[in-house]
Image (cartoon, rainbow, N blue to C red):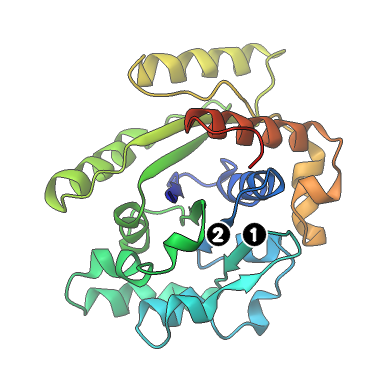
Amino acid sequence: MVEIIAILNQKGGCGKTTTAVNLSTALALLGRKVLVIDMDPQGNATTGFGVEKNDVEKTIYPVLTGEIRLEEAILSTDISGLDIVPSNISLSGAEIELSKTIGPHSILKEAMDGVSDSYDYIFIDVPPSLGLLTLNSIVASDSVIIPIQAEFYALEGMADLIKAMGLVETRLNSPSPIKGILLTLYDSRTRLGREVYSNVKEYFGETENIFKTTIPRNVRLAEAPSHGKPCILYDEESSGTLAYLKLAEEIIKLEGGEDNK
């Protein structure tokens, strides 16, 4: 059964898109059928898979405005079993369009009807904001992964994010529990890294799942998008690649699955 996972944090630079691209690739390489929906007007997840975002007409934007069906915007990637719904700067005008509709928070969820059954996982790369695009992503998702960078201001704005998720659950009757907190840009050798990890555990307590896997600060992860490739294809031996493969295995185990189908 499909699981729809939003990857979000309204704070930029936390590895949100890097996680969407590389975790989805890792799961596809482990035999899962995966779809990535790029809900960020910057379109970084789109370019991360080698898609020229400015040349694509069928993106998530006309899906949200009702011009085309979601199925029409799905593109295959170079990774077997992994598809993407692309995005580009045109999506920046979507919030105004959505605000004029009835039920503007559930448009993405409705658009996904009939498509989700074709996949094991659907990842939504959410923009770094708390606007209608983000609310649509939360409403459409079954769970949420929150990447948090191991830096001084890591937890800044987290209270607003948790509050927004709570409002979606209570007012829109659409719960999206936290699947996991993912520590990124992490170096256990530094005092700062260890302190941030401790602060994250203290903030979320024992009730939330903090992934055992952490994502290191890795130059290959930073270089890969400029080559239009997930890091797993750019450098299969890098520490960033190995970390996302380990994270994919951890997620499969959380679902009670096996390493390969």
Left or right of 251 on screen, residue 170: left
Q: Secondary structure at mark 1?
A: strand
User: Which is nearer the N-term, disc 1 or disc 2?
Assistant: 2
Question: Most extreme residue toward the left, as rendered?
Answer: 171
- The residue sitting at 33% across, 52% down in the picture is 138
Give x and y (percent) for residue 7: 48, 47
> Which disc is residue 36 wearing?
2
Q: In which quadrant of the rendered image does the C terminus lie?
A: top right
Q: How many residues crowd around disc 2 within 10 Å: few (fewer than 14), some, or many (20 or more)?
A: many
From the image, tell me which residue sits under label 1: 82
Asked if 88 appears above or below 151 in the picture, the reply is below
Image quadrant in which you'd find residue 178: top left
C-beta proximity under 8 Å, tags 1 and 2: yes
Give x and y (percent) for residue 199: 45, 16
- The residue sitting at 58% across, 49% down in the picture is 20
Q: Amino acid at mark 2?
A: Val
Measure the alpha-carbon separation of dots 1 and 2.
Answer: 8 Å
**Of marks 1 and 2, the one in the foreground:** 1
Give x and y (percent) for residue 231: 77, 47
Q: Amino acid at mark 1?
A: Leu
- The residue sitting at 79% across, 31% down in the picture is 239
Q: Secondary structure at mark 2?
A: strand
Residue 39 appears anywhere in the view: no
Q: How many residues crowd around disc 1 within 10 Å: few (fewer than 14), some, or many (20 or more)?
A: many
